Image (cartoon, rainbow, N blue to C red):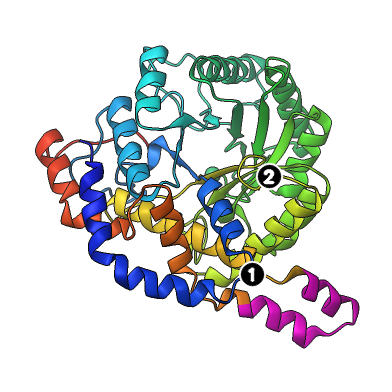
Amino acid sequence: MQIEKYRIDEHNHSLKKEHQRRFEFIAADIKNVDDVIQKLIAFQVAIPSWALGTGGTRFARFGGGGEPRNLEEKIEDIGLLHALNKSGSAISLHIPWDIPENPSHIKALAAQNGLKFDAMNSNTFQDQSGQELSYKFGSMQHVNKDVRKQAIEHNIEVIKYGIELGSNALTVWLSDGSCFPGQLNFRKAFQNTLESLQEVYTELPDDWKMFVEYKAYEPNFYSTTVGDWGQSLLYANKLGNKAYTLVDLGHHLPNANIEQIVSLLLMEEKLGGFHFNDSKYGDDDLTVGSIKPYQLFLIFNELVEGMDAKGMNHATDLGWMIDASHNVKDPLEDLLQSVEATMITYAQALLVDRKKLTEAQNRNDIVTAQEILQQAFRTDVRALIAEARLRSGGALNPLSVYRIEKIRENLIKQRGSKTIATGL
Ligand SMILES: [Mn+2]
């Protein structure tokens, strides 16, 4: 289904007066408000194709109905989100869950929905039916060369699909590692993984990037072969200038200082992409900003500061993606919330008075430095985000339009209540 533009306009009209009052209130305090809004309009967050269905845990999965049954319907769902918030104009595909049987048709369908293809994701963390060799004991790290070769060939195949769709990045997340001491020779596992990645890297087109995503634990619980940003950076540095580290917020050990990691990776020009989610305990994959919004703000503060220091374009020089799972919510509502939280936090980071912050840092004036950050974090920027959406043709309140228009009910009517989208 598609949402008619006039319905969004009607909805906006009914909220316009109240919005105007809120917007003028905040705009009065921001010197370069049009600049900020332009940056918000340009900033786009990719939606992964596996986030449109209900997620599950290892205990159960409780489907919500109306889930997309194929890639076409996934594109349709992301198109709906984008029509509402104008901030999610890219789709990130997962192979083999979403193999485009007819790439030119899929590419055209995405374009009709105003969407492009973001980074392609390979999958060597599970066995597919009919697969010759198992990844039970790893893929690129495996002691058996044939298994490594199979994993390499899979990644090369993913690049080929990506080329046909107009993507320009490959994200490699490996679940490789070990569950028990003694199971693995760490050095050999690293070297096998590096050699495998090198073979994939040589197949990367010139204008492509390779993102090496790290994760501290799970599904392996003793060691992980790309376990932290240090290991990822080692691979990226050894691979070459098209390889970068990818930070997924949920992939750290508890209490890791992610903002510092981000700052140093940007300094080294090795931060390639970012996966947004939130967590309380581990890789919980909860809605962005739902648990630790201040941490997210501190991360965005470093992202903006670090990108500006290198003259980078906030919207296009890094890959931004939501990577969350929706176990008990309507996935589309959750994604609207996640994108909104991302935009709010980005806007807050744009409001930080960098000149005053630098001056305070140089005076060792800790109190002022802290106040400057908290001033930005405690600013209610929701009217700024809404204004950016309004100017780009989206809805002032996407979630409310989603509910008033009964989008989920309509999707269930169209697709049925028992459909299950591919994914975890
Ligand atoms: Mn991720």
Q: Is residue 372 magenta?
A: yes
Residue at image point 34% right, 59% down: 396
Compared across the picture, whether 236 is left or right of 68 comes to right
Q: Nearer the viewer, mark 2 or mark 1?
A: 1
Name the foreground residue: 345 vs 173: 345
Within-10-Å neighbours for mark 2: few <14, some 14–19, many 20+: some
Residue at image point 70% right, 64% down: 257
Q: Does the magenta stretch include residue 131?
A: no
Element assignment for label 2? loop
Residue at the far left in the pictured view: 413
Within-10-Å neighbours for mark 1: few <14, some 14–19, many 20+: few
**Residue 19: percent from left, percent from top:** 35, 69
Element assignment for label 1? loop
Q: Which residue was labeled with disc 2?
A: 313
**On-image quarter of the C terminus:** top left
Q: Is residue 218 above or below residue 259?
A: above
Name the foreground residue: 382 vs 158: 382
Name the foreground residue: 101 vs 396: 396
Q: Is residue 306 above or below residue 54?
A: below
Residue at image point 72% right, 37% down: 244
The residue range painted magenta reads 355-375
